[in-house]
Image (tube, grey):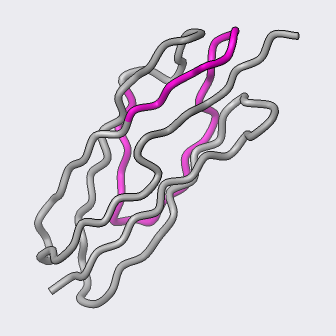
Amino acid sequence: KDFAQAELRPDRIAFGAVAIGKSYVRKLSLGNVGSIDLRILEVSSAPEVSLAFKTNSVGARKTSDITLTFTPFEKGAFNTIVKIRSNDLRNPYIFVRLEAQVD
């Protein structure tokens, strides 16, 4: 049976010490090791985080970059999970853990 299979790297980003109001950008790599197109269906994240996709579909055995931008707006420890839902039947949700200390 044909299927899409998502692989996201890295699955954890530690920003370390960051400043309120400044934007921090990281690249993620979304791979599809399956045999049909992987489609991104939904993204859930904290308001401080935004994701920019080059495309919402990744071909079989291809990868695509995602740009993650983090702009903190309150002091303290920041810990959150970004959730990406796809048409990967075995594992429809992939997660990225974000951590930072906002000064």
The foreground one among 7 and 55 is: 7
Rendering quarter of residue 33? top right
Measured from the top left, where is residue 22 in percent x and y? Answer: 11, 66
Measured from the top left, where is residue 95 in percent x and y? Answer: 56, 52
Query: 61 above or below 25?
Result: above
Query: 24 above or below 30?
Result: below
The structure residue drawn at horizontal position 47% and vertical position 62%, both measured from the top left corner, is 97
Which stretch is magenta? 29-53
The foreground one among 80 and 5 is: 5
Query: 42 above or below 82?
Result: above
* Residue 51 is a magenta residue: yes
The structure residue drawn at horizontal position 39% and vertical position 65%, both measured from the top left corner, is 98
The structure residue drawn at horizontal position 55% and vertical position 33%, both measured from the top left corner, is 7
Query: 87 above or below 100?
Result: above
* Residue 65 is a magenta residue: no
Placement of the C terminus among the 4 image quadrants: bottom left
Drawn side of residue 15 relative to residue 36, left or right: left
Drawn side of residue 77 relative to residue 81, left or right: left
Placement of the N terminus among the 4 image quadrants: top right
